[in-house]
C-alpha cells in the first residue's frame, strides 16, 4: 500500500461518519445495508438492530464474522428551567474528556448542535480544580433561552455524539470519533464483499454480522450468535496499541500501530482457531501481533463463544491509540491487513472443519 497516494475506502469513511450510539444505530445500519446487501445471498435485520449478511447459505462449516456497529454516546435525561440539557453516558467514558466538546444531538427534526459545558476553572476553588466533574455536574448548551425553547428542538432520550470527524493525519494514519468499532464492522462487511467477488466459491457458509449494543454489554452478539448458530466465529474489534508514552508493557503487552492485526490468545479463544489465523497470516504474508488475555475479553467474542452449545471463537483487533476518546487513532493499513487475513482464513476452511478440540 503506497502511503503517499493512499485513499481510504468509501465504505469505511461512510461508517465513520455515521452517528450510532448503542441503541440508536440507524445511521451505521444504513451504511452497512447499502454496501453489504448487494454482495450477500441473504440479508436479515432483527429486533436488536443486528445486520446479518450470508454468503453461500448451504456451505459447511458456518463461519460467523462479527463487528459491532455501535459507538459511545450520551443520552439526554433532563432539561433545566434555563434550557440546559443534562445527560448520562452510553458506554464507558473517561469523564475528563467530556467537557468543552462540540456535540451533535440526533433528533426527530434532524441534527442539533451544542457544546458540553461545566464550571470554568476561574470559578473553582483550588480543591475543585483537582477534581474530575461528575456527570451531573456537566451539561449541554444548545443556546436555548428556556426549557420550553430547548424542548422545541430536542426530546428526552435523544442521543448525542462528539463532533469529531474522520481525518487522515499522515499517510495511512487516521483519526476519528469512532474507529471503535466502525473499523470492525467495515472489516467483516468488506470481507464478505471480497469473498463474494472471488472466482472460487468458499466451502464455508460465511455470515458477516454488524452487531448492535456491544458497548453496553455485547447484547447484539448474544442474540445474533444464537440465531446464526455458527461452528466457527471471529470477532473483530479494536485493541490497545501500547506504543505511546506512559504505557507499561509489563502490564499491557507490546502492540503498535502499523504492526498488523492483533491475534488474541487465552481462554476466550479456541486454540485451533488461533492456530488457523496465524497460519492464514503467514500464508498471505501478513504481519500480525499477539496479545494474551486471561479472562473473557471485553468484546463480542465473550458472548459468541458461549452461544448455544459453544462456538469455536477467535478474536482479531485493529491496534488503536486513545480508545474511548473523541480522537481515536489507527493505521488504516492494519484495517486492510485484517480484511486480507479474514479472506484467507475463510477460503482455507473445508467441509467438516468445526475446530473442536
Image (cartoon, rainbow, N blue to C red):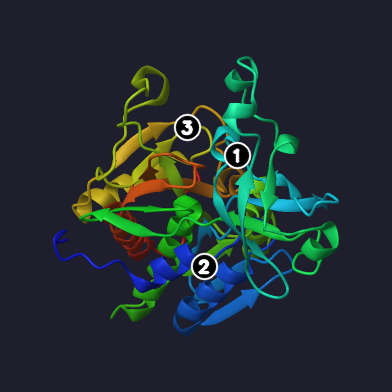
Q: Position of residue 165 (x, y in %)?
A: 44, 59
How many other residues sit within 10 Å of disc 3, few (<14), some (14-19) or many (≥20)?
some
Tell me what residue is drawn at x 20 percent, y 55 percent.
Answer: 171
* Residue 158, above or below 196: above
Q: Position of residue 325 (x, y in %)?
A: 49, 42
Q: Residue under circle 1?
A: 93
* Residue 167, above or below 136: below
Q: Nearer the viewer, mark 2 or mark 1?
A: 1
* Quarter of the image with the N terminus in it: bottom left
* Residue 57, above or below 159: below
* Residue 296, above or below 71: above
Residue 207: numbered disc: 2
Tell me what residue is drawn at x 39 percent, y 75 percent.
Answer: 193
Residue 40 in sight: no
315 left or right of 144 in image: left
Indicate the quadrant where residue 320 lies.
top left
Q: Residue furthest top?
A: 127
Sequence order check, earlier mark of 2 and 3: 2
Sequence order check, earlier mark of 2 and 1: 1
Question: Is residue 342 or residue 259 the one in the foreground?
Answer: 259
How many other residues sit within 10 Å of disc 2, few (<14), some (14-19) or many (≥20)?
many
Gap in angstroms between the C-alphas marked 1 and 3: 26 Å
Q: Position of residue 35 (x, y in %)?
A: 46, 78
Residue 96 in sight: yes
Q: Position of residue 27 (x, y in %)?
A: 58, 70
224 left or right of 154 in image: left
Q: Nearer the viewer, mark 1 or mark 3?
A: 1
Question: Is residue 190 or residue 267 the one in the foreground?
Answer: 190
Q: Residue under circle 3?
A: 266
Amino acid at each position: 500500500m503506497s502511503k503517499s497516494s493512499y485513499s481510504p475506502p468509501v465504505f469505511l469513511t461512510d461508517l465513520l461518519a455515521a452517528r450510532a450510539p448503542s441503541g440508536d444505530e440507524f445511521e451505521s445500519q444504513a451504511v452497512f445495508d447499502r454496501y453489504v446487501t448487494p454482495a450477500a445471498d441473504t440479508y436479515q435485520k432483527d429486533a436488536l438492530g443486528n445486520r446479518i449478511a450470508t454468503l453461500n447459505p448451504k456451505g459447511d462449516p458456518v463461519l460467523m464474522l462479527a463487528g459491532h456497529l455501535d459507538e459511545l454516546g450520551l443520552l439526554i435525561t433532563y432539561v433545566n428551567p434555563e434550557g440546559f440539557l443534562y445527560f448520562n453516558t452510553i458506554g464507558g467514558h473517561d469523564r475528563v474528556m467530556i467537557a468543552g466538546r462540540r456535540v451533535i444531538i440526533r433528533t426527530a427534526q434532524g441534527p442539533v448542535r451544542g457544546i458540553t459545558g461545566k464550571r470554568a476553572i476561574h470559578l473553582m476553588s483550588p480543591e475543585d480544580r483537582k477534581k474530575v466533574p461528575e456527570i451531573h455536574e456537566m451539561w449541554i448548551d444548545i443556546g436555548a433561552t428556556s426549557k420550553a425553547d430547548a424542548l422545541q428542538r430536542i426530546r428526552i432520550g435523544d442521543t448525542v455524539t462528539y463532533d469529531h470527524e474522520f481525518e487522515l493525519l499522515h499517510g495511512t494514519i487516521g483519526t476519528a470519533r469512532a474507529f471503535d468499532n466502525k473499523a470492525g464492522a467495515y472489516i467483516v462487511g468488506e470481507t464478505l464483499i471480497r469473498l463474494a467477488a472471488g472466482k472460487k466459491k468458499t466451502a464455508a457458509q460465511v455470515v458477516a454480522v454488524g452487531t448492535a449494543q456491544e458497548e453496553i454489554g455485547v447484547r447484539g452478539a448474544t442474540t445474533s450468535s444464537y440465531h446464526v448458530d455458527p461452528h466457527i466465529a471471529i470477532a473483530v474489534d479494536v485493541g490497545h496499541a501500547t506504543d505511546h508514552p506512559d504505557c507499561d508493557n509489563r502490564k499491557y503487552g507490546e502492540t503498535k500501530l502499523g504492526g498488523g492485526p492483533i491475534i488474541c490468545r487465552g481462554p476466550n479463544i479456541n486454540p485451533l482457531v488461533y492456530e488457523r489465523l496465524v497460519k492464514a497470516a503467514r500464508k498471505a504474508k501478513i504481519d500480525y501481533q499477539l496479545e494474551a488475555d486471561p479472562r473473557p475479553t471485553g468484546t463480542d467474542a465473550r458472548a459468541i463463544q458461549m452461544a448455544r452449545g459453544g462456538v469455536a471463537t477467535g478474536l482479531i483487533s485493529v491496534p488503536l491509540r486513545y480508545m474511548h476518546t473523541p480522537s481515536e487513532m489507527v493505521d488504516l493499513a492494519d484495517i486492510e491487513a485484517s480484511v486480507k487475513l479474514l479472506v484467507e482464513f475463510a477460503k482455507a476452511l473445508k467441509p467438516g472443519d468445526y475446530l473442536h478440540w
